[in-house]
Image (spheres, helix red, strand yellow):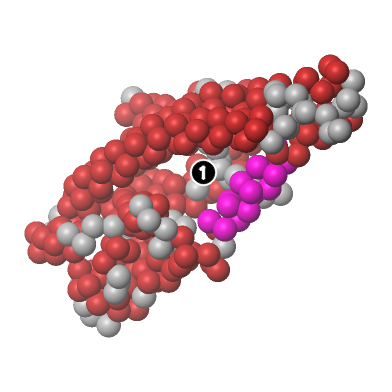
Amino acid sequence: MTQTPLPSRVRADMFSQLAAMERAGLPTATAWGLLNLPSVQAARLQTVQKAVTRGSSPAMAVLNAQLFTALEGSLIRAASAAGSPAHAYQRLAESCSRKSQIEGKIRSRMALPAATLVLALLIQPLPPLVAGTLTAGSYLMQVLKPLISIAIMLALARWALKSGQFSAWLLRVPLYGKAIARGDAINFFESLALLLEAGVPMFEALPTAVATIENSVIRSAYARIKPSMQRGVPLSTALAEEISDPMHLGNPHVIEFIATGEGSGTLPEMLFRHVKAEVEALSEFWKQVADWLPRIAYSAVACWIVFGMLTGGGFAPKVPLT
């Protein structure tokens, strides 16, 4: 059965614990046996702990249990083969923690508007219900219909985000399109830096890094980099030749960072430096989104309530027809 990886917050905690125990010199089996996770994920962790105790590699065990993403499993496997995975664990802990903070901020900001909407849905049909002009079944339908409609729209939006048919259109959405491209570019360059730092060869690291790109249009563009490099050109040149839309790079200056890293032999370090600056810029964007989404939601709920009142579907009583 296919399962989703653990939430970013839980993975960040796991990687942080593993990094600390690895630095303390604990054996791998002991470290995994001492991991402490919330009870909801404990059963999946126990499967990994048993496999590691029997001698299986942690990377293969977590991939089989689908606790981590494919990239994280590949990175742990490469770092373990090269020596101690402590540094890789710490890098992953920081990356997952950053994602968790952004996700948590948006969820917490949207909790109150969502509660306000539900409360408004419950209150609006109450007057006719109390007056006896609305049955309990009709009241329940009036409450549930908008919620079902919202759930369907969210499901369609989630499907559209993953569908290749809408990938090009999403990139043309003002502000949001640039944020998507910037986020995918960050995923690629950070993943590539992590893999290269762990000792994975470039041609093996590229497909794994490309797989972290969610938008199919951008992913197709980055997939052309490896064949170009196999013809003998460096990464910076391949990016300049194959990524025709500068927006797909997130920040076109990344090519300069990469060229500098290739010339000085510090490519992972330069990629991490670029990613750090890009993450700060993108985090600021999502911070503003988290600030404005509740305001938009409150306005939408208020307009809906006023519309209901003006059309006679809200708190105001209808005037009987003569």
Task: Identify whether 177 is placed above or below 283.
Answer: below
Count of picture labels:
1
User: Which quadrant would residue 307 be assigned to in this image?
Assistant: top right
Q: Position of residue 27 (x, y in %)?
A: 43, 31
Q: Position of residue 61 (x, y in %)?
A: 56, 44
Residue under the point 70% across and 24% down: 316
Q: Please tell me whether the stretch drawn in magenta is mainly helix, strand or loop.
A: helix
Toward the top, the furthest residue is 130
User: Which quadrant would residue 252 be assigned to in this image?
Assistant: bottom left
Toward the bottom, the furthest residue is 231
Question: Which range is magenta?
Answer: 147-161
Decide if residue 43 is on the left or right side of residue 145. Answer: left
Dot 1 alpha-carbon crowd within 10 angstroms: few under 14, some 14 to 19, many 20 or more: some
Residue under the point 70% across and 28% down: 314
The residue lying toward the viewer, choosing from 66 and 221, is: 221
Task: Identify whether 154 is placed above or below 170.
Answer: above
Residue marked by disc 1: 68
